[in-house]
Image: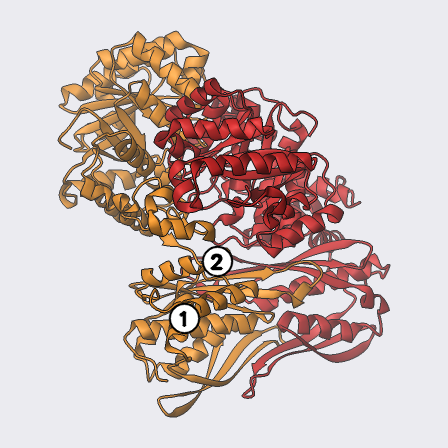
Chain colours: A orange, B red
Amino acid sequence: MTDDRFHVYDTTLRDGAQQEGLNLTVTDKLAIARHLDDLGVGFIEGGWPGANPKDTEFFRRALTELDLKHAQLAAFGATRRAGVKAADDPLVAALRESGAPVVTLVAKSHDRHVELALRTTLDENLAMIRDTVTHLRENGQRVFVDAEHFFDGYRSNPAYAVEVVRAAAEAGASVIALCDTNGGMLPDELADVVHEVIGASSARLGIHCHDDTGCAVANTLAAVKAGVTHVQGCANGYGERSGNANLFTVVANLQLKRGFDLVPPESLAEMTRIAHAVSEVTNVTPNQHQPYVGMSAFAHKAGLHASAVKVDPGLYQHIDPAEVGNDMRMLVSDMAGRASVELKGKELGYDLSGDRAKLTELTDRVKEMEARGYTFEAADASFELLLRETVEGERRRHFDVESWRVIVERRPDGELVSEATVKLHAKGERIIATGEGNGPVNALDKALRLALERLYPELASMELYDYKVRILELGRMGTGAVTRVLQGTTDGKAEWNTVGVDENIIEASWQALEQAVTYGLLRAGHTLDA
Amino acid sequence: MTDDRFHVYDTTLRDGAQQEGLNLTVTDKLAIARHLDDLGVGFIEGGWPGANPKDTEFFRRALTELDLKHAQLAAFGATRRAGVKAADDPLVAALRESGAPVVTLVAKSHDRHVELALRTTLDENLAMIRDTVTHLRENGQRVFVDAEHFFDGYRSNPAYAVEVVRAAAEAGASVIALCDTNGGMLPDELADVVHEVIGASSARLGIHCHDDTGCAVANTLAAVKAGVTHVQGCANGYGERSGNANLFTVVANLQLKRGFDLVPPESLAEMTRIAHAVSEVTNVTPNQHQPYVGMSAFAHKAGLHASAVKVDPGLYQHIDPAEVGNDMRMLVSDMAGRASVELKGKELGYDLSGDRAKLTELTDRVKEMEARGYTFEAADASFELLLRETVEGERRRHFDVESWRVIVERRPDGELVSEATVKLHAKGERIIATGEGNGPVNALDKALRLALERLYPELASMELYDYKVRILELGRMGTGAVTRVLQGTTDGKAEWNTVGVDENIIEASWQALEQAVTYGLLRAGHTLDA
């Protein structure tokens, strides 16, 4: 962080970690901090040292293990307790001794919260703020103050809320972040309050928003327009309830649409990768629709537009996706025509522009199969196999299946058994293999790999990681309806998706399995026999 | 829709259906329309009749199958092609003949799009708009116009963009919705444009936003503040790329925070249920963090604030969650406590108030089973069987299953065979029956009925009409994840729903089947043997 004029302050490791179901280890936190530093944020709030052992350890390990290029670490904590000196409060001591160059103190700014949650007087709360800020400043740390419940507090008692801001600034806090802690604000009203506070105090202000009205990003932008120069948010919009302001969206909006120079352009071009890398650490499924960095953020479905997209992609995109490291994706769907099939082929490395007949044949097959329930937009690998089959004029295979059988049985003793047998021909051999599993598809998967693993050892590293079932054409058809199975497979380096459709769920799963294995073997470099 | 002064216009079935991975059948669309009508939206855009057979069928079936209480149906379509009369354009004819009282015409308002995508002149585009609007108005339909790419168009050629609005209004369109088709706008700039257009035309304006900057909701609110009186959006924020404006969030914000009277308060209190019901139809996992209606939207970590929350929950919530039918969650359990189990029992005709022990036992079982993936909200019959079992102190049955076995086989000649055998005891007999079906569950269903039909002839009139599968706890578990099956059964007079959960999909289906048959026999008056 070389430029102090505008702060990008990340609180993923503290407020983001409050998200339901999110549970970060110290190692996770260190990994996320490195990703955020790669993006170029100015401040990384690491947690609350002293309040829990994990966060204390994070700051201890950060001293030796984190080598931050841009960011400074901030330790979060509360003002001293009522009735003691800051110097004597063990929680303040933990902040002082955290080794963090910045301390962010949370302070109550809503009169009712002071009385009901803190159970002290309004004056003592001000003294707690002044005393704690002064003490940490004397210790050589920079101090930011999070004015908690600020906007609700301003509604309840504007004079007191402003007094909190003044007290913090006068004691030496360099930023006072106004927090919409309950997340209920809308942008116009929030901007009005920021304007009024800027008029009533000379403090440097920041903003901290939650997404309970779906306006966290817009609220942050409104506050910036009103004059704040410090924005807080979380990677991927993590946070309690509906989440915090998504820092990625805020940064992209400010930098690409408002001309702010917040992170190096080459780091912004890493944002999509970084967003996904953070998801890997948190183990939260990435939001496919996340602005800028989601897998679908630049995915186009409507066939109508594909021809114009070819002429000028800018007509259908609000920015060039490369600026945030994302890609335009054409989805192949029943709404698509030849133009989008051609573009999709190009994306996968096949130039179909020279062969109108093949392109038409492929488009017709896609449409016909989608009418029967297949969906290729979520199954790139199946689409690529279909494309190759069409281009090569015949179906080539690594193996030929003679038959398979699945038995699921509940025995008289209550035991449940799933067993599958696959008979196939590969490399001139006839192979029979039987697998057991915790369900019919798992058993089939095991039998198929068992049959092939000796000939194709790469199969050992492939794993089925996602399996989705959808019954199509519900209504009066019951179990006779068509079943679509979407399957995700990984070899640890890449992931690919395949689709199967049949009225029989086992057959649909088999189709997806067979394609997943075929695609994996192609990736591993095994060419196809005619 | 009794009040025309402000329009809540839903486009889930058209623009929302563009979401990657979303693939709605006609039956799905009818079901979603009913849910939206329950919420009280004013208009439901059903699709593009004439452009694809599915949407044509939707409007045909809607005429007889949809009995809307509040909403009017809108048919979406394009202005006539260049160089033909509206009366002679077959796509315009499909709109005219759709039976929809409202037609929403998409019109180009960006000069470059007219030239590059439509490949016609700016004047002809205006003529196409005037001609098509006039023609449909003469046919007695109300016409709205979606001004596509309006904001980008306004940036490129403001005079022309405004001319499009004027032309549409003068021809008789009652609303012109300004569309941020590429979704790149931020609220301040969008509001400025809306202000200017309102100053330059007397047309009634609407707004249609996408979430590519994370500001779709805020953009919609900004446009309303600037003077539009018609808002478009989608259930759960579905839509292409990052999605459309989330209509649920927009309605809740306007009604609860801006004093608009958009839907009846008792319908607003159904919003959480409706949001989840729509997810069931689309089979898109509900966004847990969705504002207002997400499962986490009012979830609080206890501890620190618990005492203050007890004194005044409003200190930690931006609204009372009951207003949108959601709940504050401080406890672990989903289905709340004994009170709601007691209430549910009463609803089914069982008075549990006199037996606290049984009530506690039942509540504990419900909680324990829901933790394992069961859901009783959508499976009343399963809940009632569980209740009876608890009240009666033991499991009573019409039949005792000894074992079952399912075989699914693809034979060397390519034939696919599904066969199930059930062995059971009923009325003192041991019965073995084998059924064939088009899949494993269908075969099991047939075998079970075959085994019981001689003893219970009523089974002949029972039919499985709905079967849904959801894989829970996805992640790195692949086919080992837990599978939940929800099944709907009917005897022609009533319908009932049962649930089964197991890592094995066949076992989960069996549980739901067995309960469905048991419940059906109870309905038919067969008491249970101990």
Can you give x and y, in whole percent of width and height, for residue B530 in the image?
79, 63
Q: Where is A369 relative to B210, above or below?
A: below
Q: Where is A525 relative to A239, above or below?
A: below
Give the label, 2 or 1, closer to the camera. Answer: 1
Can you give x and y, in whole percent of width and height, for residue B359 in the image?
69, 44
Can you give x and y, in whole percent of width and height, for residue B331 in the image?
53, 38
User: Can see residue A178?
Assistant: no
How far apart are the alpha carbons under marks 2 and 1? Answer: 18 Å
| Rendered image: mark on residue A242 | none
Residue at 20%, 36% in the rendered image? A263
Give the residue type at disc 2: Ser
On what subunit does the disc labeled 2 rest? A
User: Can see residue A347?
Assistant: yes
Residue at 37%, 72% in the rendered image? A519
Please give the residue where the numbered disc 2 appears in the rendered image. A333
Give the camera-side residue of B434 and A65: B434
- Label 2 secondary element: loop
Please give the residue where the numbered disc 1 appears in the rendered image. A358
Classify mark 2: residues with Cα within 10 Å, few (<14), some (14-19) or many (20+). Answer: many
Give the residue type at disc 1: Lys
Q: Where is A157 relative to B283, above or below?
A: above
On what subunit does the disc labeled 1 rest? A
Asked which quadrant contains residue A14, the reply is top left
Q: Is residue A308 left or right of residue B229?
A: left
Can you give x and y, in whole percent of width and height, for residue A288 in the image?
41, 49
